[in-house]
Image (cartoon, coloured by chain):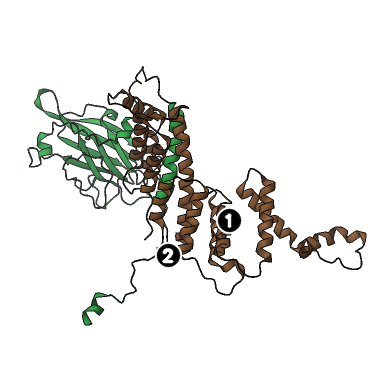
Chain colours: A brown, B green
Amino acid sequence: MAAYEKRRPGTAPSGGQAAGSEAEFLLRAGVTAMVREALLKVLEARPEEPVSFLADYFERLVLGDAAAEPAGPPQRLARALWYVSLAPHSHRTAFDSNTGAAYEVLGGGGGGRRRAAGVDGRLYSELLRSICQHGEAPAEAAAALLRRVRCRDHEAVPFDVFRYGVLTCFVLLEFAAKADALFAVLDGGSGAADARVCQAVLRALEEALGSGHFTQPRRYLEAGSRLGPDGLALAMDRALQERKLSGSTSREEFLKKATALFVAKVKPVE
Amino acid sequence: MSGAAGPGPPVGPGRSPLPCAPRPAAALQLSGGTEPTRPGVAVIDLRFPRGAAADVSAAWGGTVQEIVFKNFYTAFLSVRVQRPGPGGSRRWVTCLRDMCLMPCPHTEQGAQDYFSLHRNQMLCDMDQVTAVRFILRQPSPVWLQFTIEELQIFPTGQKSPQTDLPSWLSQLTPPEQPASLHGELPDPEKVSTEVQQMWVLTEVIRTRQAAARIGRFDVDGCYDVNLLSYT
């Protein structure tokens, strides 16, 4: 691209210094740093199609550099959304640094303005909503979660709260995916699973989560024994032996109940 | 209770030691010696109050279950108990002979350790015991004093009450699997994998909390009660 071409110096360097000057050229052009950044991002995100990911990345880079004025809120929102979805939330350091970049972009500080406006509640809520929509979370669960972690429109959102909200949204998405997979196992291919079995499994999960606020290692042992294959098999067997009339649970209902369990454990922002 | 100051050795739940008051260790005195010598042998006598006010000793059948103490630079320990012998008299029987508490009497190893002597380790039966005598030996001249502290004697008959076992512990070895599991059960392994991952995710969120609070309802001090009362 024209913007990136640099004039070669008039006198060609002699052959002996060719290797040295090439490295210097790359360094001067800023290519080394840029390529290193791009490689880091690819490693963090591990996309299925690295080529399109890289193309997307460079395109955004160009747009970001070329824009004279920082973009308006929708563009900033899109950019922030792209940043936070780069690395999965389980890669904690990568996720944190991406969230930091997103926070800056959203706050308007990334465009070189002298005063960053900061992130207010409205932008924060919109970002969370678009994360949930992008990941196709069940609507009710997303709404309930947003109610818990939301900030009022006029409030300034500090970075910790921002990171907490974004992380919670991503964990909710993964949780919903896992609940979906669980339902697929429970129903065994048919579209509906036995209501008693679903209830037994969800009840076991709820009991394992417990209501206390302890962080003793004992809780992990306890949960492990409750949710082991033996315990679950017994619970499901006991449920099936009850004589109550059994209905069937559909996928949406199961997802709703499971995500309700999750959202209940999210600490609200205050 | 033993007369030692300090926290004392850990006592198992539900066990209470017999009330006894050990006198300080009396050093062996060689007759005829005028200057105080350090003979390296000391004796601690314990007598159990007979018919004393404490319910424990009254109901005590004289059986000793365990002796727990903290060593203080004693190298070897012998224990003798007084038991009723044939014919009604009481005689002293050695129940522990020269137990080595410190592998090398000159060095620190074992010098301040806690020891526990169970009745199974004793040479004789520890029933109908009326008195206990501890004979301490410390042949090394390095240490100025030696004794045993925090002496506690536990009688039998006091089972440590079953502490409330958490329910999941008793489920670790489950009773025989019901042989006829319902045929239509979904695969428990897969279910368990998924459910455990869901549990982990929820735990991650539940233990995290926004470190910074929005401070929605914080006031900056202008609503202090003292100030309000002046306006």
Nearest the viewer among B203 and A61 is A61
Viewport quadrant of the N terminus of chain A: bottom right
Give amino acid for label 2.
Answer: Asp
Badge 2 density bin: few <14, some 14–19, many ≥20, Cα 10 Å = few
Residue A226 drawn at (x, y percent): 36, 34
Residue indicated by mark 2: A153
> Contact (CB < 8 A) between labels 1 and 2?
no
Residue indicated by mark 1: A83
Residue A9 drawn at (x, y percent): 87, 68
Left or right: residue A21 versus residue A32 is right
**Viewer-nearest of discs 1 and 2:** 2
Is residue A231 visible from the viewing direction of this image? Answer: yes
What mark, if any, has residue A215 been given in the picture?
A: none
Quadrant in the picture for residue B203 = top left
Residue A47 drawn at (x, y percent): 63, 45
Residue B89 lies, with reference to residue B204, above or below; the image says: above
> Which residue is located at x 67 percent, y 60 percent?
A61
> Which residue is located at x 33 percent, y 25 percent?
A240
Furthest-bottom residue in this view: B231
Q: Secondary structure at mark 1?
A: helix
Residue A72 lies, with reference to residue A42, above or below; the image says: below
Left or right: residue A24 versus residue B95 is right
Give amino acid for label 1.
Answer: Tyr
Nearest the viewer among B23 and B126 is B126
> Which residue is located at x 66 percent, y 44 percent?
A49
